[in-house]
């Protein structure tokens, strides 16, 4: 192996490039201690530095904007001149110059570093609502059977539309198929059509049982009093929407 030592490369006049042959396998920059290993300039003005911080953390900085590779923590952290920490100062992207997708297998810490500040789940999609009887499930023909949901952390928001005819179920009307189960019994709003109610009752809500993906539709007396389950009707239509927390 041969070594060529160059003390000075003089600035040349005119245009052109200094090119290293691709036969050069690698270049080693060996610095003793912390500090700048390489300085990058533009027309004599320093625009960036590459160096070592805290013994074995490599940093890349342009003025006070940069990052460093934290070896022991297996992390990338914001850094400033000299590779020192630059906490809570730098943005990831700017308006009009954005990153595209972000892939995470863990959580997103927002406004703090504790468990209460961690967003660890986001999901949206569709689900298939079904209507059954509480005494006998039965079956029917659906004219509408659509539903959506959005889950942010533990909070689930849902909507659905159900239309049915010729249903053979008996007992109370039970709506099921929810994509998640609530941590406690939860009520949600409904709009009901074509279903017979007990005289002088109204129906504007239903419930989902705790730790279950189904629950009954409920009616209440106009003059006040105890609510009761709505009896199964062979034909009907219901829209529903609401939120609940999962366990």
Image (cartoon, grey):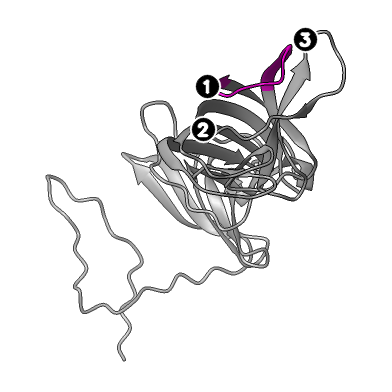
Asked if residue 114 can be seen in this view, the reply is no
- In the image, residue 155 above or below residue 219: below
Instruction: Tell me which segment is drawn in magenta.
Output: 192-204
Residue 238 at x, y percent in the picture: 54, 27
- Real-space Cα separation, disc 1 to disc 2, in angstroms: 17 Å
Residue located beneath label 3 in the image: 222
The answer to whether 103 appears left or right of 54 in the picture is left
Query: In front of the other: label 2 or label 3?
Result: 3
Q: Do the residues labelled 2 and 3 touch (CB within 8 Å)?
A: no
**Label 2 packing within 10 angstroms: few (<14), some (14-19), many (20+):** many
Residue located beneath label 1 in the image: 194
Question: Does the magenta-highlighted stretch encompass residue 202?
Answer: yes
The secondary element bearing badge 2 is classed as strand
**Label 3 packing within 10 angstroms: few (<14), some (14-19), many (20+):** few
Residue 102 at x, y percent in the picture: 46, 48
Residue located beneath label 2 in the image: 160
């Amino acid at each position: 192996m041969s070594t060529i030592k160059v003390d000075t490369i003089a600035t040349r006049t005119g245009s052109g490039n200094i090119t290293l042959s691709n036969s050069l396998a690698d270049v080693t920059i060996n610095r003793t201690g912390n500090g700048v290993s390489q300085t990058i300039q533009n027309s004599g003005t320093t625009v960036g530095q590459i160096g070592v911080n805290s013994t074995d953390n490599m940093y890349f900085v342009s003025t006070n904007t940069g990052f460093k590779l934290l070896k022991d923590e297996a992390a990338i952290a914001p850094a400033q001149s000299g590779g020192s920490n630059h906490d809570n100062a730098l943005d990831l992207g700017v308006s009009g110059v954005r990153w595209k997708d972000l892939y995470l297998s863990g959580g997103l810490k927002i406004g703090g570093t504790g468990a209460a500040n961690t967003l660890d789940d986001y999901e949206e999609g569709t689900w298939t609502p079904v209507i059954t009887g509480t005494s006998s499930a039965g079956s029917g023909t659906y004219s509408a059977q659509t539903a959506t949901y959005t889950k942010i952390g533990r909070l689930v928001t849902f909507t659905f539309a159900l239309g049915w005819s010729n249903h053979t179920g008996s007992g109370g009307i039970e709506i099921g198929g929810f994509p998640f189960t609530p941590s406690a019994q939860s009520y949600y709003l409904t709009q009901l059509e074509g279903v017979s109610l007990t005289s002088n009752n109204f129906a504007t809500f239903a419930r989902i049982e705790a730790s279950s993906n189904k629950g009954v539709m409920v009616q209440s007396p106009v003059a006040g009093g105890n609510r009761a389950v709505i009896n199964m009707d062979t034909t009907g239509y219901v829209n529903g929407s609401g939120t609940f927390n999962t366990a």
